[in-house]
Amino acid sequence: MNRSLPDGTPAQAPGLSAEGLRARKKRLMRQQLSDTATAMFLARGFDGVRVAEVGAACGVSEKTVFNYFPVKEGLVMDRLEATLSALSAALSDPGRTPVQAVLAVLDQELGAMAGLLAAQENAPVAREAFRRFGDLIRATPALRAYMAEMTDQAASAAAGILAVRAGMTADDPEPQIAARALLGLWRVQADSVRRHLDRAATPALLHERVTADVQRAARLIDTGLRTFAAQDRAAAGKPTQRRPDRRP
């Protein structure tokens, strides 16, 4: 799902004036495909809709749909690639601790969601759309498997970045477990959104309560990562020393 609500309501993309015409057309087609597919999946189930039907609804061929989304699951969860890119950039910033970097990305995503909710005139309908979107993912094995695969890719990328920062190799246990713990904060945020979606009277209050939950979990992770952060600081200012491969 792109920068829109699950009911297909579009949101303006930032920096549109600096965007080329061709790039804009591709972005809008990608958004149309994702939004149309999401609406169809919500109505009929993920397995009840063929990719060719999504293309026909948007006036393009099945091949064109796959040019934009190599796998069907990507039509629903296209934001995962953007999340991976933002996470990699944030973790590479030496001015932030790993926990601070992840919290910044999560807050940006949560803020975007709260902003979309605030922009809707019919708040109950908007909240129901978000709830149904989450239910669709949880009820669809293919989508859960795709999310797990993307999470593995994100964890691998994060472990590599953390290893470089700490002067280790990516297969060392410390960057591996640190990456997995940090990625777990996305699940904490998703569960918190689901829990507070109906309880929070306003999008701003939803943002506040979810943020509090995520920060509680982050503090627990940060306690365990302090020694890892110390290694990070010790490695700063000197060439990264790769440990020899200890695998047999």
Image (tube, rainbow, N blue to C red):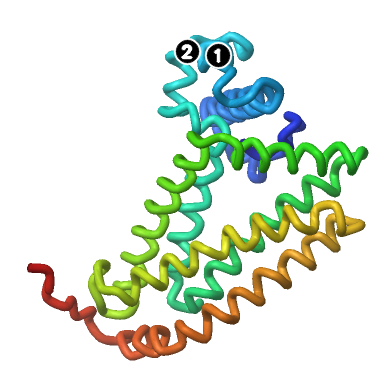
Q: Are marks 1 and 2 in contact (CB under 8 Å)?
A: yes
Picture quadrant where residue 201 is located: bottom right
Q: Amino acid at mark 1?
A: Gly
> Quarter-wise, where is residue 163 in the image?
bottom left
- Where is residue 174 shown, x and y percent of the image? 33, 77
For residue 26, side relative to residue 239 (left or right):
right
Seen in the picture, residue 201 relative to 222 is either above or below; the reply is above
Q: For the point 83% across and 40% down, which residue is it?
A: 126
Q: Residue at x 22, y 81 (%)?
A: 239
Residue 222 % position (x, y): 52, 81
Q: Which residue is mark 1?
A: 55
Q: Which image quadrant for residue 154? A: bottom left
Residue 27, position as x, y percentages in the image? 57, 31
Residue picked out by circle 2: 62
Point out the image quarter for the C terminus: bottom left
Where, quadrant-wise, is the N terminus in this rendering? Answer: top right
Instruction: Decide if residue 128 is in sight here.
Output: yes
Locate residue 234 relative to residue 73 in the image: left or right.
left
* Label 2 SS: helix
Question: Image height check: is 117 above or below 69?
Answer: below
